[in-house]
Amino acid sequence: TTTTTTTEGTYPDLCDGGWQLGDGTGGSEKNIGSAASRRHCLAMVAQQCPDANGATLPPSGSGSCYCEFGMTGRSGTGWQSCALLPTTTTTTIPPAVTPPLQHCEASLSLSNLMQNNLGGVGPDSGAEEMRFSKVLEVDSGPVDLKIVADPGYQNVRAGSNVPRSTSLGQIGVRMGTTGTFTFSLVSAETDVPVLANFSLSFWDIDGTGGGEMETVYIAGFTEVYVTNTTELLRTDSAEGTLFSATGQGTSEDNPTSGDRASMTQEQLDRSVTAKFEGVKEVKISLGSTGEPKKSGRVFSFTGSGIVVC
């Protein structure tokens, strides 16, 4: 069994002359969602628009990402663009990795969801965050997991942020858009950021019958794990890694919990575990390909190593 990895090279080698001010001109373009960074945008373009020869992004370096087809020049100063150089695609067999025992022991307990108003969409009122209370105990005391959405997050139904079972987290994102989130570990008593080691696993990463595919972009990890028979397409960059679904899912094949023992091989093959060491916060982007729609996609996560533990 093989997985395909798109090798991007070292920035700015992917862009002819680097990223430059100006909107790509000379052909057509397609909005493929929100990107957390220039690298994230390039990874999205590689996955969703293999025939594109350019990418466009706001000057801030994040926001709406566009594929450029037939790009021959630039105009204006309200955007920045990259004239793509060819990338190299390789096919590799991922090695079996046995993680250290502490990787499986450093789990976050997500059983106490005390605030659920991510991006201000509810169902709770008050602070615009999702907060799990006392997920971890360190020398200085109990630690909370706080999740905050970057501007532009869209969700069509507040109920999609309500976990389907205990010990899980769940985030809904409007189909055809991408939301970027900061996962922070903070003191439960003072809200001050705390350094810690932990794991996050995302599962049920699949697509629809219409061809829309879910994507999970993870930055700042020490190690990342998928199964040797994974269905996920992995695109690495200097800033993070994009995991894209390749298989179609249905409601009948959704896992009912984040317990590895209860998951089928297909469910494990649609999961990814990331290990973080000595960090206060990490950036995660969740989204799906295709045009924005009135329906949404649900992303489930847990604070343990589903793939490896």
Image (cartoon, rainbow, N blue to C red):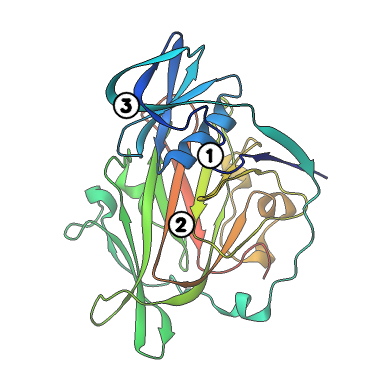
Q: How far apart are marks 2 and 1 (CA)?
A: 19 Å
- Report whether 105 appears left or right of 35: right
Q: Mark 2 points at which residue?
A: 164
Question: Could you tell me the amino acid type at mark 2?
Answer: Arg
Q: Which of marks 1 and 3 is nearer the N terminus?
A: 3
Q: Which element is circle 2 on? A: loop
Which is closer to the viewer, label 1 or label 3?
A: 3
In percent of width and height, residue 84 lies at: 54, 26
Q: Where is residue 300 in the image (x, y as percent from the top left)?
A: 49, 54
**Quick one: 59 or 20, which is closer to the camera?**
20
For the point 63% across and 46% down, the residue is 253
Where residue 79 is drawn, which disc sits there?
A: 3
Residue reaching furthest front?
17
Q: Is mark 3 on a helix, strand or loop?
A: strand
Direction left: furthest residue: 126
Instruction: State if disc 3 and disc 1 touch (CB < 8 Å).
Output: no
* Residue 116, picture quadrant: bottom left
Asked if residue 147 shows in the view, the reply is yes
| Amino acid at circle 1 | Glu
